[in-house]
Amino acid sequence: EIVLTQSPGTLSLSPGERATLSCRASRSLTPNYLAWYQQRPGQAPRLLIYDASLRATGIPDRFSGSGSGTDFTLTISRLEPEDFAVYYCQQYSTSLYSFGQGTKLEIK
Amino acid sequence: QVQLVQSGSELKKPGASVKVSCRASGYSFTTYGVNWLRQAPGQGLEWLGWITTDTGNPTYAQDLTGRFVFSLDTSVSTAYLQINSLRAEDTAVYYCGREGYSYKAVDYWGQGTLVTVSS
């Protein structure tokens, strides 16, 4: 099973700042089948990025994904108030998928 | 529009069974696989597995002990998750989710079903 480790656990930033979230895999993802989800309190998760760098339908272009192999990044270029939430990465590169433990993005 | 509507909250005693349903609408049910996931209170997401909706072939996460069963009724575009021999640690919100057309990430989610296991 591939283990995903997200960092940092909590990120404190202000609206308008740039956020960089990391997801590291215990072994290389081939292909780069990695997704990023946003989860607000009391809501189901929402798909942001799939296949490491492709934005899902309706996702603003301030969200971008990058990376390959074992190191992946979600970048939010300019934080809006609604972006403060928990973010999860997920790999679906093997037949058994797995999630990272999450990064909480909080208002500073 | 694509919708996944799950059954309501359940309160069960340890050792009992529960069956959660996930009714799909707005698309061809047998074209997209269905994932099952859960989230314990205050915790992260856990992937439980998925089921192909054309053949009904399930794949279960490595950690599951055989108490979890995925099934389908394609005549009503519904996927089911049954959990047997419930334990307190099964208390969680259970989600179903549809995979994407050309990718396996979950692009549409059900609203979640809270299953509480308590004596």
Image: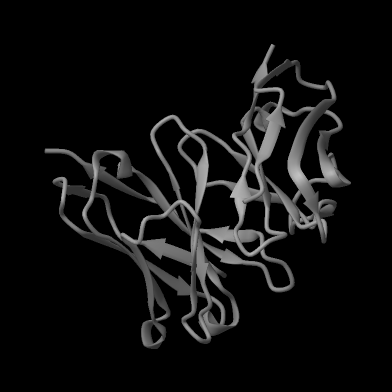
Q: Which quarter of the figure is the C terminus of chain A placed in?
A: top right
Percent across and percent down for residue B73 are 36, 82
Q: Is residue B67 above or below residue A28?
A: below
The residue nearer to you, when weighing A95 against A53, is A95
Percent across and percent down for residue B106 are 61, 59
Percent across and percent down for residue A9 are 65, 23
The residue nearer to you, when weighing B101 against B86, is B86
Does residue A64 appear anywhere in the picture? no
Please count the marks in the image: 0
Dividing the picture into quadrants, the one containing residue B20 is bottom left
Q: Is residue B72 above or below residue B104?
A: below
B48 relative position to B85: left or right: right
A41 relative position to B116: left or right: right
Residue at 46% over, 72% down: B24
Percent across and percent down for residue A85 are 61, 30
Dividing the picture into quadrants, the one containing residue A105 is top right
Q: Is residue B29 above or below residue B98?
A: below
Dividing the picture into quadrants, the one containing residue B1 is bottom right
